[in-house]
């Protein structure tokens, strides 16, 4: 966060973005989910579309995970696999996940920035996937974009004390708070501008994250937060923590809220694209 410690950007390289589509909370199989990558435009707008792919549970690199309810395994679901070539590193990106509106709500993930130092290279091993399918050859980077079920879109505001739900013309902002080493931060206080109808933090259960209305001291060990019912348009997200020497900034980001959708902003310290001009 301080001059002299900034992480500078490097020349961009092309790579393949790949992974499975994760489901936040509850929901069925993440199959036929459209994953689309955009450059980030001014004030968090959607810039040029860089590529798209439909995640499939029939691919050998798809995954199976347990569905958890009240600490009990109640079933399993499949997470579809996708690949998108021609994605630039060292570039602010937005990743959109969308599916059948009867079951899913669109989710836009911001603050996707791929440092050259994290690019995978070389031939993947056959153990990385099942069957004959393997992860892409050459330069690649793994991302698990999330999508949220329509049922959670309704139930989370209700649990968080917003019984009327998300109004027409508004959306949700959520995500995690991490430090500069990408480690989740507990007791982070988060806010947005414009302000949400309700700001909520979640429990400590990664398999079944639920809002906890009585939690006012900040994020749990998961670093999760949600700003419920934020007007569509530009939004600023910021977080602070309290250390021995007072209030410490954990970062900020400008994104866009989309009507009837979730905008994910996970803070990871200052990004190269946020470094102030000299």
Image (cartoon, helix red, strand yellow):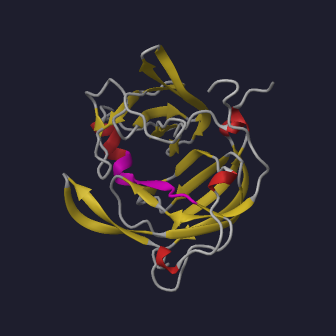
Q: Taking 213 as reference, is 32 left or right? A: right
Residue 123 seen from this side: yes
| Residue at horizontal 45 percent and vertical 33 percent from the top | 229
Q: Taking 110 as reference, is 196 left or right? A: left
Quadrant in which the N terminus is drawn: top right
Quadrant in which the C terminus is drawn: top right
As rendered, which of 163 and 217 lies closer to the eye?
Answer: 217
- From this view, report whether residue 233 is shown above or below residue 126: above
As rendered, which of 193 and 183 lies closer to the eye?
Answer: 183
How many numbered marks are there?
Answer: 0
| Residue at horizontal 19 percent and vertical 53 percent from the top | 71
Q: Which residues are magenta?
A: 142-153
Q: Residue 8: name its quadrant.
A: top right
**Quick one: which residue is furthest to the front in this view?**
4
As rendered, which of 48 and 176 lies closer to the eye?
Answer: 176
Query: How far from the left and from the top, in percent, is residue 89?
Result: 71, 53
Q: Residue 251: name its quadrant.
A: top right
- From this view, report whether residue 20 is shown above or below residue 209: below
**Quick one: which residue is furthest to the top in this view?**
246
| Residue at horizontal 33 percent and vertical 23 percent from the top | 217
Query: How far from the left and from the top, in percent, is residue 36?
Result: 62, 59
As rendered, which of 233 and 92 lies closer to the eye?
Answer: 92
Q: Is residue 101 magenta?
A: no
Q: Taking 123 as reference, is 224 left or right? A: left
Query: How far from the left and from the top, in percent, is residue 187?
Result: 37, 28
| Residue at horizontal 65 percent and vertical 71 percent from the top | 122
Residue 236 seen from this side: no
Query: How far from the left and from the top, in percent, is residue 264?
Result: 51, 43
């Amino acid at each position: 966060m301080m001059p002299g410690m900034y992480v500078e950007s490097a020349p961009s390289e092309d790579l393949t973005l790949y992974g499975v589509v994760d489901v936040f909370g509850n929901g069925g199989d993440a199959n036929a989910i459209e994953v689309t990558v955009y450059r980030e435009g001014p004030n968090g707008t959607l810039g040029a579309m860089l590529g798209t792919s439909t995640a499939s549970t029939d691919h050998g690199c798809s995954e199976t995970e347990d569905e958890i309810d009240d600490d009990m395994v109640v079933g399993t679901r499949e997470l579809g696999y996708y690949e998108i070539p021609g994605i630039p590193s060292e570039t602010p990106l937005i990743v959109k996940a969308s599916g059948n509106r009867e079951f899913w709500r669109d989710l836009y993930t911001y603050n996707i920035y791929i440092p050259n130092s994290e690019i995978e290279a070389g031939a993947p091993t056959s153990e990385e996937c099942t069957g004959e399918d393997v992860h892409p050859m050459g330069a690649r980077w793994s991302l698990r974009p999330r999508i949220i079920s329509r049922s959670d879109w309704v139930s989370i505001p209700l649990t968080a004390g917003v019984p009327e739900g998300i109004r027409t013309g508004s959306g949700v902002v959520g995500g995690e708070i991490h430090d500069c080493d990408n480690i989740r931060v507990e007791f982070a206080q988060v806010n947005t501008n414009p302000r949400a109808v309700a700001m909520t933090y979640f429990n400590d259960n990664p398999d079944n994250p639920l809002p906890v209305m009585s939690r006012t001291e900040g994020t749990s060990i998961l670093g999760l937060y949600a700003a419920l019912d934020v007007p569509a348009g530009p939004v600023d997200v910021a977080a602070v923590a309290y250390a021995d020497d007072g209030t410490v900034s954990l970062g900020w980001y400008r994104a866009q809220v989309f009507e009837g959708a979730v905008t994910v902003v996970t803070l990871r310290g200052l990004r190269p694209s946020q470094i102030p001009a000299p």
